[in-house]
Image (cartoon, grey):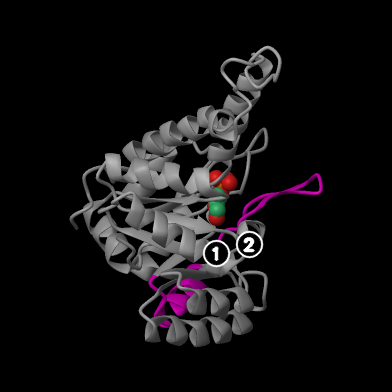
Amino acid sequence: MIVNATRMLKAAKAGHYAVGHFNTNNLEWTKAILLTAQKLNSPVIIATSMGAAKYMGGYKVVAALVKAMDEALGITVPVALHLDHGNYEAAKACIEAGYSSIMFDGSSLPFEENVAKTTELVNLAHDKGLSIEAEVGAIGGTEDGITADGEVADPEECKKMVSLGVDFLAAGIGNIHGIYPEGWKGLHFDALEQINKATGYIPLVLHGGTGIPDDQITRAIKEGVSKINVNTDCQLVFADATIKYCAAGKADPTAANEAKGYDPRKLLKPGFEAICAKVEEKIKLFGSENKANY
Ligand code: 13P
């Protein structure tokens, strides 16, 4: 069942758990996320970055794939199809392409411009029944070998963003995309407390869900985080399982002649199963198991 993410995240905030946002990259990823959410009776957010959507053939392809697969697999739990870190053009394109939720990431823009563009997109998204996430305070990460600490959002800017009508807010609290560097100092819980106070009922979003210790995840949920984004973790387990399968010679056309282990349906199976296991682990950690009927 494809829905927007507003009600599922409000329920998560009120119930002190978080809904997992899992990035998809292809058909196997999509199927693994949907089937695991269904197995655990959990709401779920399935998301594409702009790059992953381009790789898959565009936003319309993604929307058609997710909707058709949701129906074909008989998925009954609530599923939001979300754009992750969209620019202005991508956000507009996804509203038209049939996504049920968008993130407009204007965090690299001057704050006033972020406010102006977010305001416009809030109206466009809400007119069509989509939910919308905005961002204040950039999320750090490693790019071209340069590692930046995650920025900490200003609570007053968060308050302003929420007043525009966004449904949930990504506020940097020292979190970083990808693998956390040695010596990372952890999440800034003092900042989270101030942001949560300033924004009240609004569900907060924690990006960079890979590699944050479980106790910090649990504490962040207790202190106002209701959506947690995970991407790299699924990529790591998929790569590891696929590498092990190949290293064991299972894809070798001569050695595996009988089993035909080079058949893509077999070659991609260990990675698919690894994603299912990772998504299950995260849903249980975030506490959204059996929360499909909010
Ligand atoms: P990770 O890749 O660190 O899991 O972060 C995902 C994310 O925040 C997507 O927006």
Looking at the figure, which quarter contains the N terminus?
Answer: bottom left
Q: How would you rate the neighbour count of disc 1 (Cα within 10 Å): few for under 14, some for 14-19, many for 20 or more? A: some
292 and 76: which one is in front?
A: 76
Would you identify the image quadrant in which residue 226 lies? bottom left
115 and 117: which one is in front?
A: 117
Image x and y of residue 139, in percent: 61, 56
SS at mark 1 in the image: helix
27 versus 216 height, above or below:
below
Tell me if label 1 and label 2 are in contact, CB under 8 Å: yes
Name the residue located 42 percent from the left edge and 31 percent from the top edge. 277
Q: Which residue is mark 1?
A: 61
Name the residue located 49 percent from the left edge and 85 percent from the top edge. 119
57 and 113: which one is in front?
A: 57
Label 2 sits on what residue type? Answer: Gly
For the residue with label 2, is its CB less than 8 Å from the closest atom of ligand 1? no
Q: How would you rate the neighbour count of disc 2 (Cα within 10 Å): few for under 14, some for 14-19, many for 20 or more? A: few
Image x and y of residue 244, in percent: 62, 20
Q: CA distance from mark 1 to mark 2?
A: 6 Å
Name the residue located 64 percent from the left edge and 16 percent from the top edge. 257
290 and 12: which one is in front?
A: 290
Image x and y of residue 288, in percent: 28, 46
Q: Which residue is mark 2?
A: 57
Whether residue 253 appears in this view of the structure is yes
Q: Which residues are magenta?
A: 139-167
216 versus 12 height, above or below:
above
SS at mark 2 in the image: loop
Instruction: Determine if the magenta segment contains residue 147.
Output: yes
Image x and y of residue 168, in percent: 40, 67
Would you identify the image quadrant in which residue 238 lies? top right
Whether residue 225 appears in this view of the structure is no
Instruction: Determine if the magenta segment contains residue 294.
Output: no
